Amino acid sequence: MRISFLAIGNELIQGKIGEANGRFLAQELELLALEMRFMLLAGDNPEEMISAFRFLEEQSEIIVCSGGLGPTPDDLTTEVFAKFAELKLILDQKILDQIKARFKIRGIEMPLTNKKQALIPESAKVIPNLFGTAPGFELEHNHRFWFFLPGVPNEFKQMTKDSIIPRILEIKKIKKATKSKTLRIYGITESGIADRLSVLKFDPKLRLAFLPEFPEIYLRLSAITDEEEEAEKIVNQTSQMIKKELGEYVLSEEGEPLELVVGRLLKERGLTLSTAESCTGGWLAKRITDIASSSEYFLGGFVSYSNEMKIRELGVSEETIKNFGAVSSETAKEMAIGVRNNTGADIAIAITGIAGPSGGTKDKPIGTVHIALLDEKGFWEQRFQFLPLSREMVRNLATETGLEVMRRRILGLRMPGEKKDEQK
């Protein structure tokens, strides 16, 4: 049975935002050994949408559509599909009441424009949306199964997991057990991973997918068998094999973000942390505090963007900045000393660098970043030269590297710049 995906929205066609829902659906289908046949984009134009509907109807048995279910005038998906399928739109009072209730909870009256979200084609079945006002719907038309979901990624993902995937399994009469696990990898290239794993022999029922997501790589392991116990055994055994082969490059085996991994290590060891940031502008502290209960280990941080702030608040020597510059090993170390003295944290980490797009020199080009860490063991400091990337990517890499440095330090792994015989 052929499955296709259609994303609707001018913002996608114009490149203002990236399309993520189709990718997510494809990954979920891949876990079930199912493949996407077509993945299309269409603007908020009735003629373009009808052309896409017509094409997909000819090529697929299952079509999942995303976007255009909102309350604004350019949200046309429901009415255009109803026209395409020659179906009447009916007002679903239950949906309307639910939308009104959502607004009431927020203490405001529902705008009249939201009423259109309660209109669905006759014979359609509502797909509940727990996170937004736009419900989805499904129907069978011309022996094709159509699914319509909102374009908001977190709503689409949850509805896909809760409703779409189970329905596809039901339609295809798939009753096999599926198990999956996602390993999160950092510090090694995709080709490097492939080379290392080439020596391993995997179970024929195991499916391995590489999912690069800069600056990390996800390895998704999945198995489909007749028995759940067998599928789980295959995935767990494969996970252990890969972890043994890749070792220190495996951040987590449940796809957990690096900030969660570091936070858990800090909690387990009863350690506290503080940060001093310049070029990252508080991004590292933000990622750390994105994790619930981070107050148990994160004491606070300083965004010392200017030289004056570094000197006044962190105690960086004026002579240090004059002789070595704000982006230097010496300044990074003194920033770490300053924030540790100010907060009393067990671990202090400091980041200073040149994110661009200007400010680089011959000796310190754009992408130069110094990271210093201070704990009871003493200092660790390293200069990193990230490739000429965008400002955001340099800052992202700096925070990612800062978190990875902490993970390695806490676990006693070899630090960047250290040789094996130097590891403490």
Image (cartoon, helix red, strand yellow):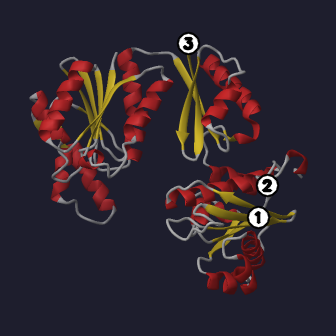
| Residue 226: numbered disc | 3
- Asked where in the image residue 312 lies, by quadrant, the reply is bottom right
Identify which amino acid the numbered label 2 is placed on: Arg
Q: Position of residue 131 (x, y in %)?
A: 38, 49
Q: Residue at x 21, y 52 (%)?
A: 71
User: Is 318 placed left or right of 107 in the picture?
Assistant: right
Q: Are marks 2 and 1 in contact (CB under 8 Å)?
A: yes
Q: Position of residue 185 (x, y in %)?
A: 64, 40
Relative to 151, say whether 63 is above or below: above
| Residue 373: numbered disc | 1
User: Is 87 placed left or right of 391 in the picture?
Assistant: left
Q: CA distance from mark 2 to mark 3?
A: 43 Å
Is residue 121 visible to us here? no
Residue at label 2?
A: 409
Crowding at label 3, few (<14), some or many (≥20) Cα neighbours within 10 Å? few
Q: CA distance from mark 3 to mark 1?
A: 50 Å
Q: Residue at x 15, y 43 (%)?
A: 45
Identify which amino acid the numbered label 3 is placed on: Asp
Relative to 192, say whether 421 is above or below: below
Q: Nearer the viewer, residue 193 or 156?
A: 193
| Residue 48: numbered disc | none
Per the image, label 2 sits on a secondary structure element best described as: helix
Q: Nearer the viewer, residue 192 or 172?
A: 192
User: Is 135 placed left or right of 23 in the picture?
Assistant: left
Identify which amino acid the numbered label 1 is placed on: Leu
* Viewer-nearest of discs 3 and 1: 1
